[in-house]
Amino acid sequence: MSEPAASIHHLHADRFAELVPRALANVELRGALANATDTIRNRRATALAGVDDLQALRGRAKAIKSEALEHLDEHLERFEKTAEANGIKVHWASDAEAARAVVLDIAARTGARIAVKAKSMVSEEIGLNDALIDAGVVPVETDLGEWIVQLAEETPSHILVPAIHKRRREIRDLFARVLGRPMPDDAPGLTAIARNELRTHFATADLGISGANFLVAETGSFLLIENEGNIRLTTSLPKVHVAIAGIEKIVPRLEDLAPLVRIIARNGTGQPISCYQTLVSGPKTSPDDDGPEEIHVVLLDNGRSRLLADELTAETLRCIRCSACLNVCPVYRQIGGHAYGSVYPGPIGAILTPQIAGLHAASQLPDASSLCGACREVCPVDIDIPGVLLHLRHQAAASDEDDAAGVDPVTETKNRAARRGFGLWRWAMASPARYAMLGRIGRISVRAIRRVPRLSRFIGPLRGWCDGRELPPAPDRSFRDGSTARRISARNGGRRGE
Amino acid sequence: MQVALFITCLMDQFRTSAAEATVEVLERCGCDVVFDPRQTCCGQPAFNAGQHDAAIPVCRSAIRILDEQLQDGCEAIVVPSGSCAAMFRHAIGLLDGADAEAASRVAKASYELSAFLVNRLDRIDVDAGWTGRVAWHDACHGLRELGIASEPRRLLQAVRGLELVESATCDRCCGFGGTFSVNLPGISVGMADDKIDELESLGIDAVVSGDTSCLMQLEGRLAARGSTVRGVHLAEILASRDHASGSES
Amino acid sequence: MDRRLDESAPGTEAVVENDRSRVLADVRRALASARTEGKRRGHGPEPATAATPVERNSVDGSMATHAVERSDTDLITEFQSALDAVQGVCHRVTSDSGAAEVLQAIIADLAVRRVVRSDDELVIDVVERVVGGFELLDPDRDRNAMLECDLGVSRATLGVAEHGTIVMTSGDAAGDRGRRTERQRLVSLLPETHVALLAASDIMHTWDQALEDVGSDRRRLPPTTTFATGPSRTADIELELVLGVHGPRHQHVVVLEHR
């Protein structure tokens, strides 16, 4: 079975082990992340306190997305039919390359020189900006956070707040350097600079490129959600509008939008509702009207369809990109988005990235978690992120057998050690006598290392513990060797045989 | 009531005081505690690492032993650890056939310690005394997989001489996460620091948890930081009759 | 790239393998596989509670839910306080001339020099009543001129009381796709200040109801429907809330209670 090559642009998740210490050493970054994630978390809590029946709302959101995925092919075909009846041109792209080709073709045909872009994670995923530049089209990011990272020649580090890793003064200095003049120090002043700079691009752009939050099969419409107004401009001013969306963005009915709109802002940014929702159902009907003459929707697979084959992995596709999981993840809080080396960081990124791009390209990401479950707890569509992480870890561990998922070198080294270690562990746990012996050796070793810390180098991968932590004081004997254990096991008429 | 005790490998080997305390509390509440010494580990460390080849036989063994105890007359299984109790639920999907059915029975009959006392025995006051100011740490599996939040707090509030304060970071992961703690030690320690920075601002004598692994992680970092805050297992507090803060427990 | 052949052309060959057929085939194959395969081994159990930190974490053991008190105020009042909460401004008038006075005051307050209006009848009528002192552009002017405008006046098709949202429909001024929409959506978007005229009888309670109204004929939705709640905003710089980004900085809604 040949599959199209799914890919994520500029993926470097194989450098995770190397990027983590760098992120941890970056005091500024950690301060920015702590401040930002704490703020969003609090706003979310307040926003959700205003919802009468939160569980019911989450249940509805989950049900809508589940239903959409269950018959995704039917809904996709229906969307194509209804959208085209509205005058929207629908394109299909099995992978990133196909999607880029569609957009470049439209740009070439319409003679576009400048393309304004609304924030679209999917466009980052397929590496659209680089492709546009190569084709002689200038892409201009218009979302403030995206524009900031574009000027800094970086990638976004969060799926809703792209420049979350940057302090205000860093942004001020960046603007000053790029625009060649002194800059105000306050956020409103810096924002006004961005507004003025980007205005000119909006006015002259030939092409507007966006993502889509939801596609409605029933009516052939799609919904765009934002706060800044740049999406409205991107989709109103240029003559041609192209929206790129993953196939999982489909919902069956128009009314399905309501619970999703209701929960996405509260859960993601802590607002009761985002500032603007734009429901696009077709190009303008007469030349005198405002709005684009041509509207295109690109339906992107790029590895998503594979996830539908399994009930658990399919849950990944329920994601509505609210980013709540990033904001509660204690790991993301420590290292930020760039360390993940993927367009999709954080908990959702840790499961989406390897499933799109292949475990071999991102096998360290499923390990970037303590399985605390905070992500699942806040997920508005109840994705079992810990469950998928466990599934991917199992795949990675079994990779040298028939599953043949393949992993990156760092994971391979870790797996080898884990196989050996857990092989020994399994052997020991199989009998109470061996277990007791392993326990005794463990306690003796721990006591020795506590006295002579240098000995820690002999405990192999476990020595990672000693970097910053003391080992526990180890008791002389275990519980089961004591009189209490004997007494209470004697209750059933003597010790059970080994 | 006859209850089977699953002591957990970590507590058995590294925190015998808490193990003894667990038995003490259960017996004080009128339970007939039975310990099957064939038990070793629930299998979670390997399961979390994706190592099913190792996890399955170990988990199966634990399930069979406990299921046997249920057949022999134990009405419940008490586990002084949220993560191990939660593992029995995962066992249902991990094992096959008759073992999966046994796992189902075991999971249904299993309780983390505080959940057992409060929800099964209807006990809030276990006649404990422990003088000091403490904050509760919500261990992740117990909190999010088993829904345990109010039970330990109510038990602690009933302890004579104990002052319970809420930590703003109570539901944040301590950073243990099994092999995560040694594979990504920098992140793991950072996560512990997040909590400890806040705990130290509360003027508490100790952070209390129901999980040995969380305590190992927090105490390990607290000691490295030279902190005056200690770690205590819930059972150790509940078994105390008249502990005074600052004295040896 | 989608190389789908034009199916209406006579003598067209059967569609060859292309992205469309590949994507649909891949989706169908995966779905079929999921239906036949049993539940995945090791799939995590449902959590005992899906409580959020807001709902639990109380020392006294109660799982208090924070119910929102909603009294039975009338829709206009609810709309006004919701709009106020998102830094928009709601004006209530009882006549068309009252609306004109409000508009006059806003223009004076903000020292507005150039105003652009949409082609809605009510808007034309109200703006006509406003005493001069500013340059008025009609929507036929080119967009560069509109970029120089300080204030835009247009009609809100609907209002949503629960959030203070206005709903604007555009792109179908001839009414080909259904009900007539406003021609100029840039009027509500480009200038720094937007004033929307909203008839009180057009205020719905919930966003859901507004959506249902706009989509009452599922086959003929307006080309564009915009839901706007307060001035544009961002928190992209250190999570600090800043009003007025690409959309308007000032959002006024004049509720005509007599309509």
Image (cartoon, rainbow, N blue to C red):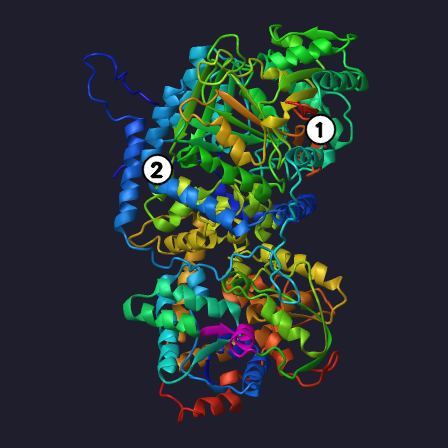
Q: Nearer the viewer, mark 1 or mark 2?
A: 1
Q: Residue at x 45, y 56 (%)?
A: A414
Q: Residue at x 32, y 55 (%)?
A: C39
Q: Residue at x 29, y 31 (%)?
A: C22
Type of amino acid under label 2: Leu
From what the image shows, is residue A346 above or below residue A478?
A: above
A295 or A195, nearer to the observer: A295
Residue C108 is left or right of residue B102, and the answer is right
Q: Chain of mark 1?
A: C
The quarter holding residue A427 reads bottom left
Residue A218 located within the stretch drawn in magenta: no
Q: Position of residue B39 (x, y in %)?
A: 42, 79
Q: Which residue is mark 2?
A: A72
Residue A176 is left or right of residue A400, and the answer is right
Q: How many marks?
A: 2
Write the start and end of the magenta stretch as one range: B110-122
Q: Position of residue A107 (x, y in %)?
A: 45, 15
C187 or A121, nearer to the observer: C187
From what the image shows, is residue C115 above or below residue C230?
A: above
Q: Which secondary structure class fits the magenta region best?
A: helix
> SS for tag 2?
helix
Q: Residue at x 53, y 37 (%)?
A: A261
Residue contact between numbered discs 1 and 2, judged by CB atoms under 8 Å:
no
Residue B113 located within the stretch drawn in magenta: yes
The quarter holding residue A67 reads top left
Residue A206 is left or right of residue C149, and the answer is left
Estimate the spatial distance between the alpha carbons at disc 1 and disc 2, rounded to whole Å: 43 Å
Residue B99 is left or right of residue A32, and the answer is left
A397 or B232, nearer to the observer: B232
Q: Position of residue C212 (x, y in %)?
A: 48, 31
Q: Which residue is mark 1?
A: C90
- The crowding category of the residue bearing disc 1, from other C-alpha atoms within 10 Å (few below 14, some 14 to 19, many at least 20), is many
